[in-house]
Amino acid sequence: MAPTHTTTDVFSAIAEPRRRQIIDLLSRHRCLAVGTIVLTLGLPQPAVSKHLGVLRDVGIVSVSKHGQQRVYALNHEQLRPVYDWIKTFDQYWNRQLDRIRERAERRALAQSNSPEAPTRKKGTP
């Protein structure tokens, strides 16, 4: 018996790396047919369809039929809870970047204030 998915929210859906690959791919294109996703990611078609089903169930992607093809599009707004949660960490990363910048500036200042190392003549150790 095949396991059924129990993913009911955006966070659970994006926890799976292959689904994040699909989201990334769809974020770079307006919409893609299942076959294109399969070829681009090099995954088996049944696996891609299963992942797309999970993403569709939580609203991250929508599907439309164009002839015999199923075409998927990313619903960016459905990723808002993830964005809002990640945004809470901005302050941490900004502090880290500020510390790196300050260290680099101190190092550059120290190097500019120190006497230059003697230059060697070509061919001397």
Image: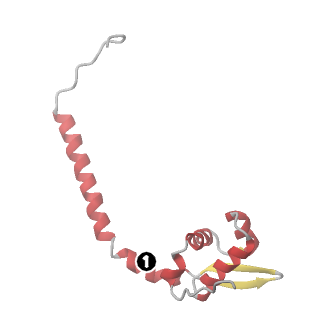
Q: Which amino acid type corresponds to the residue marked 1 in the rendered image?
A: Tyr
Q: Position of residue 50 (x, y in %)?
A: 67, 80
- Is the C terminus in the top left, top right, bottom left or bottom right quadrant? top left
69 and 45: which one is in front?
A: 45
Residue furthest to the front: 1
Q: Is residue 55 left or right of residue 79?
A: right
* Circle count: 1
47 and 40: which one is in front?
A: 47
Q: Is residue 90 above or below residue 102?
A: below
Is residue 61 in view from this perspective?
no
Q: Position of residue 80 (x, y in %)?
A: 46, 82
Q: Position of residue 15 (x, y in %)?
A: 51, 75
Q: Is residue 16 above or below residue 55?
A: above
Quarter of the view holding residue 5:
bottom right
What element does badge 1 sit on? helix
Q: Residue at x 50, y 81 (%)?
A: 12
Quarter of the view holding residue 13:
bottom right
Q: Is residue 111 above or below residue 96?
A: above
- Pointer 1 residue: 83
Q: Residue at x 70, y 67 (%)?
A: 43
Q: Residue at x 67, y 64 (%)?
A: 41
Q: Position of residue 74 (x, y in %)?
A: 60, 78
Q: Is residue 12 left or right of residue 106?
A: right
Q: Residue at x 22, y 42 (%)?
A: 107
